[in-house]
Each structure stands twice: as C-alpha cells, then as structure tokens.
C-alpha cells in the first residue's frame, strides 16, 4: 500500500509541475489529465465521461478568441448634413432679429459614422461536435467613431453683419448638433442592422478558417 501511495504521489507531483508549465493552455491540461487517468487505471471513469457526452450530445471545446480577428466587423455610413447659424443682434437681454442686424450661415458637412463591436464581448458555446454546430452571441452594436470630414465643407450662404459677429464657438456648437443628428439618421437608416450582417460574414469566415471548424454551421444570437 505504501508503494502504491508513493507512486500516486509521484504521478501527482509530476502532473502538478506539468500544469504549471502549460498554465493557460486548456487543451494541454486536458491531455495531462487523461495521462493521469490512464496511469491510475481509472478506465471506468473515462468510459462514464464518454457516456455522459453522448447523453448530453455536447462536446465542449476551447472558446474561440475573437480578438484574433484582424478585421473588426464594422459598418461605415457617410451622411451629408446641413448646418445653419442664425445669430440676431443682442441688445442687453433683447434680440434684434432683422435682415439688417442678423447674421446667417448655411453650410454642409459629410458626417462619417462607424459602428461595430467590442470583440471581447463576442461569445460562443464552444461548439457541438456531434451536430457540427457552433452558436455565437453578438452583443449590441455601438458607434465606435464619428466625425465631420472637414474637407467636405460647402458654404451655401453667408450673410454676416457687423452687429452680430459669428465666431468659432458658434460653428463648433452647430457642428456638434449636426454630428448628433447624423448619428441618429445613420441608426434610423439601418446602420446597426448592416453592422450585424457584416460581422456575421467576417466571424463565419474566421471560424471556418480554424482547424476542426471548417464544416461547422455557425448560428448567431443577437442581444437586444
């Protein structure tokens, strides 16, 4: 009995060292675990494990790392927005809004809106080897970047009066307004839906490029 205990301790210590060396690799840890099972002659336990897999119809594998996707799945929308500055002359608390005292600008910018996903939030169920299916859950898309293309500026009307000078602050305020409107217009125009379509194509191609997943059917769930 002492000899058997010594052998088992030796196996345990050896495996513990192996686990430290391959820490972070689930596949290698799994391989070492199988070695231990075989070494101690627990064939019955291994058979029960296989039986459980058959009953559950699921074979769990390592979760795919979507951060390895080189191309982030996003959709870009370019929208032309019109900006207007209407600035009456101010006399104390009062405004004098007349043709002779009020400054007006009418201009446009192309707003660029990009939507996509935080790749860390894309999850899958590990895949079902028996049915050759993997289910991927997409988080809700969000706007990743938005800006006005300064080179696209077009001025349609300029009627500035000395009684109401238009400054950079006035333009900055109007530009923020039209960028906000551009985001809303892009979303109403189906930006998030197109983002999801693009993401599904990119992710499906990525999964099919992985060894062992070439013929998997990729099913998507989208969070509300």
Image: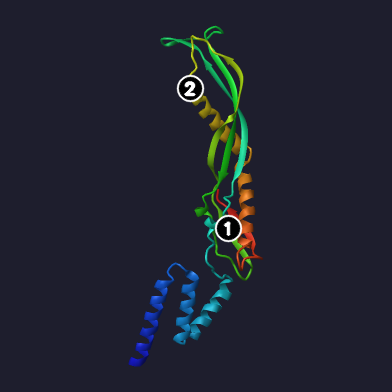
From the viewer's side, name the closer residue of 78 and 137: 78
**Residue 146, image x, y percentages:** 54, 37
Q: Residue lying furthest left in this view? A: 2
**Residue 119, image x, y percentages:** 52, 53
Residue placed under numbered mark 1 in the picture: 136
Q: Quadrant of the N terminus?
A: bottom left
Q: CA distance from mark 2 to mark 1?
A: 48 Å
Q: How is the image coloured?
A: rainbow
Residue 1 seen in the current view: no
Q: Residue lying furthest top in this view? A: 100
Residue 81 seen in the current view: yes
The residue under the point 62% across, 66% down is 213
Residue placed under numbered mark 2 in the picture: 168
**Residue 157, image x, y percentages:** 61, 17
**Residue 55, image x, y percentages:** 57, 74
Q: Residues within 10 Å of mark 1 (few under 14, many from 20)?
A: many
Secondary element at tag 1: strand
In the rendered view, does 23 fall on the left or right side of 195? left
The residue under the point 40% across, 83% down is 11
From the viewer's side, name the closer residue of 51 and 61: 61
Q: Which mark is residue 205?
A: none
Instruction: Name which quarter of the figure residue 20 lies in.
Output: bottom left
* Total marks in image: 2
Secondary element at tag 2: helix
The residue under the point 50% across, 54% down is 120
* 106 is higher (above) or lower (below) than 53: above
The residue under the point 59% across, 46% down is 74
* 199 is higher (above) or lower (below) than 207: above
* 181 is higher (above) or lower (below) than 90: below
């Amino acid at each position: 009995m002492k000899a058997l205990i010594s052998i088992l301790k030796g196996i345990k210590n050896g495996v513990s060292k192996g686990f430290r060396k391959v820490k972070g690799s689930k596949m290698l840890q799994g391989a070492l675990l199988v070695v231990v099972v075989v070494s101690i002659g627990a064939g019955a336990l291994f058979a029960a494990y296989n039986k459980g897999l058959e009953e559950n119809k699921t074979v769990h594998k390592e979760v795919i790392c979507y951060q390895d996707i080189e191309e982030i799945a996003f959709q870009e929308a370019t929208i032309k927005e019109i900006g207007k500055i209407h600035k009456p002359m101010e006399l104390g608390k009062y405004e004098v809004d007349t043709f002779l005292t009020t400054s007006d600008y009418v201009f446009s910018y192309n707003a660029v809106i990009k939507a996509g996903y935080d790749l860390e939030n894309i999850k899958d169920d590990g895949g079902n080897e028996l049915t050759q299916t993997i289910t991927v859950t997409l988080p809700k898309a969000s706007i990743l970047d938005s800006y006005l293309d300064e080179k696209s500026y077009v001025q349609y009307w300029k009627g500035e009066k000395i009684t109401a000078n238009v400054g950079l602050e006035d333009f900055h305020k109007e530009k923020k307004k039209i960028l906000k409107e551009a985001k809303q217009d892009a979303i109403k125009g189906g930006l998030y839906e197109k983002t999801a379509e693009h993401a599904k194509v990119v992710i499906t191609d990525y999964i099919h490029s992985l060894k062992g997943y070439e013929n998997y059917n990729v099913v998507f769930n989208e969070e509300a």
